Amino acid sequence: MFSYEEIQQIRNQFPMLKNNENKNIYFDNAATTQKTVQVINTIKKYSCNLNSNVNRSVHFLDKFTTNSLELNRKHMKYFINAKYREEIIFTTGTTESINLIAFCISKFLKKSDDIIISHSEHHSNIIPWQVLSQKNNANLKVIPVNSEGALNIRVFKKLMTKKTKFIAISHVTNTFGIINPINKIIKTAHKQNSLVLIDGSQAISQITIDVQNLDCDFYVFSIHKMYGPTGLGILYGKKQILDKLPPYKCGGGMIEKVTFRQTLLAGLPFKLEAGTQNMAGIIGTNKALKFLLNCSIIKVKSYETKLLKYAIKILSNINGLQIYYKNSKLTKILSFNIEKIHSFDLGKLLTNYGIAIRTGAHCAQPLMEYLKITGTIRISFAIYNTIEEIDIFYKYLIKCLELLS
Ligand code: PLP
């Protein structure tokens, strides 16, 4: 566990927090995390002194960027324990990674095949599958959840048939922070020869990911949720599957030879990375990985769980407050509602005191509709948050509730 001094040292690595004269509190880390000074400085230094494109020219700047990019691909391979470097595809984020797969598997999906998702997915892991199933006349099946938002695995097993070709499921839900039983889901899916995509957006900063051990076919996440730059995501896919996929976008960087008669595609990973990459972002990502590894992901999780337990304890003093899914394994996300209070009203009042929380449906409208709620109040922690911040949040929460009552 981190000492008070260690957390202060960590906070000092984040310019947003170090220069925080107004003592603002940032509890919206599930939406995006703040970036370390090392990430920011690396991007700045690269952009000021070394900027160039990759794999296009013979000059020294191109060579530097190309080598750095490929080195960072290797670091990412080790970070999630992928087997091959070619299994790491750079995208713009989780959303693009999922859209890429939904687009590329279209040619393998026949009429009446089934795709399975769950009721608690983020819109990014619903809409691409809805569009694909409508385009291919396939069926989109949805694993139901219980009143707390947890998956009904018994029904999932019943939904699985020979027609199931694809399952897309989040590792940790962004609404209530539920850790889904993905090991069980992947094993069950593979028994029926179905492919599985895991949306790791909310897991990647807290859980050590070993894609070979998980045996998932695809694992996707966004770098901006793990203290790194925006505009960058990772698509991991098993090489033998990615090899069979058609390109998602076409253009520069993904070809061996182009003539007007035909185009010969490059191999992996370039086949799936058309166009100019977010070079500065990829180079800055290395510092985010280093930061997380230096902190130790296990220690990060146990510290954030301590914050969450403390928040649950003090929030439980409030009459009429309902916490969603507080009794399971805890992550870093806490969602709640308070009787007769609209989440937007509370969010708007708290922002006046410099407290940033998330309110509403959290890009999961089907789940909110199912639970018959308009949304929730969500606080989500990162490694730089503190018990003192939770106390201040609680103090102003009580003040806001008095104003609203
Ligand atoms: N999936 C989950 C579970 C998320 O929490 C998010 C973002 O909040 C996304 C997908 C979409 O991520 P991005 O907007 O970075 O593509």
Image (tube, rainbow, N blue to C red):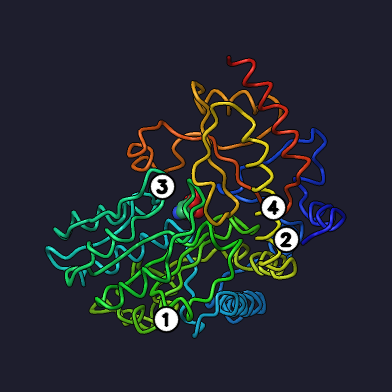
- Contact flag, marks 3 and 2 (Cβ < 8 Å): no
Between disc 4 and disc 1, whose residue precedes?
1
| Quarter of the view holding residue 74 | bottom right
Give the foreground label among 4 and 1: 4
Give the foreground label among 3 and 2: 3
What distance separates the C-alpha of mark 2 from that of mark 1? 30 Å
84, above or below 331, in the image: below
- Determine crowd level at label 4: few under 14, some 14-19, many 20+ residues with C-alpha closer than 10 A: some
As shown in the figure, which amino acid type bears the numbered disc 4?
Answer: Lys
Between disc 2 and disc 1, whose residue precedes?
2
Between disc 3 and disc 4, whose residue precedes?
3
- Determine crowd level at label 3: few under 14, some 14-19, many 20+ residues with C-alpha closer than 10 A: many
Question: According to the image, label 1 marks what residue?
Answer: 268
User: Quarter holding the N terminus?
Assistant: bottom right
- Which residue is at a point 33% across and 42% down the rendered structure image? 366
Question: According to the image, label 3 marks what residue?
Answer: 149
x and y percentages locating residue 23 in the rendered image: 79, 35
- Contact flag, marks 2 and 4 (Cβ < 8 Å): no
As shown in the figure, which amino acid type bears the numbered disc 3?
Answer: Gly
What distance separates the C-alpha of mark 4 from that of mark 1? 42 Å
333, above or below 51, in the image: above
Question: According to the image, label 2 marks what residue?
Answer: 48
x and y percentages locating residue 164 in the rendered image: 22, 68
x and y percentages locating residue 342 in the rendered image: 49, 24
Tell me the element at label 1. Answer: loop
Q: Nearer the viewer, residue 327 or 248?
A: 327
Between disc 3 and disc 2, whose residue precedes?
2
